Image (spheres, grey):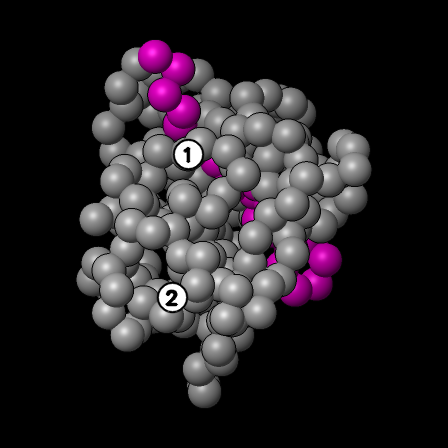
Amino acid sequence: MTASEPVPLVFVPADGVVREAVTKAGGQPVWLEEPQWPLSRQTGRPMEFLGQFALEGGRLAHLFMTGDEGEYVDGTWEPEGGENALVIQPGGHIPDFVTVERRAEGPSAGADHLPRHIDSGEGSSEGSGEHSDEEEDRRPWQFLGGPGVEPHWLQGDETPGDGWQLVVQLDSGKLPFDVNFGDAGVGYAFLSPDGKEGRFLWQCT
C-alpha cells in the first residue's frame, strides 16, 4: 500500500460536553456497547481516559493509560504491560493482559477537546521544541492514522505486527493536558488486522 502523508493535528476546546461518537481528547468515553473501563494491573484502580478516535464503520477506539495519582507505576509505555489499553467498540476483543469493569465514567485527562487539522507549514514550525532538528523532523509528530498512514517513530519501529494499522500518533507536547509519555514523548495507537484489538505504546527522547 502506498504511504499517505499525515496531516498535522491539534486539539481545541469543545463548546461543551461531547457525547457523540467522534474523535476527541479528554472528557468521558462515548460507549457504543457495554462500558469496558480498564484497570491498572499494578494498582487495580481505573486507568485515565485520554481520548477516543473514530474508526471505519462507525466504530471507536477508546484510549486509556494509568495515571500518576501520586504513585509511580512503571510500564505505561509497554503495549502489553497492562498499564494502558485501546478498547475497540463495538465488536472488539479485550486482550488477556487487560482487565476491565462495567464503569461508564471515570478518571479523565481533562475536558473535552476536538481535533483540528493544521497546514503542514504551521505544524512543522510549531513542533514540540524538544525533538531533533533533523530534516525528517519536518514531518508532523501528531496526526490521525488510517490506511497507508505510517508512524513517525521517535525511536525505532515498534509496530505490534504485520498488518497493524496506525489509529493515531500523539505528541505529549501538543496535547491540551499533561500526559506522561516520558521526556518529550510520543504515543502510538494501533488497530489489529482483524479490527478487533488495539495496542498502545509510547517512546521518549
Q: Residue at x 34, y 12 (%)?
A: 70
* Disc 2 versus disc 1: nearer the observer: 1
Asked if the magenta segment contains residue 60, the reply would be: yes
Stretch in magenta: 51-70
To which residue does mark 1 refer?
Answer: 179
Give the secondary structure at mark 1.
loop
Name, please, the residue furthest toward the top.
70
Q: Which amino acid does label 1 sit on?
A: Val
Q: Which of 117 and 32 is in front in this view?
A: 117
Q: How far apart are marks 2 and 1 (CA)?
A: 19 Å
Q: Where is residue 25 in the image (x, y as percent from the top left)?
A: 59, 41
Q: Position of residue 170 (x, y in %)?
A: 45, 51
Name, please, the residue furthest toward the bottom.
2
Q: Where is residue 132 in the image (x, y as percent from the top left)?
A: 24, 60
Q: Which residue is drawn at 30% across and 14% down?
A: 71
Asked if the magenta segment contains residue 62, the reply would be: yes
Q: Which residue is drawn at 47% across and 47% down?
A: 174
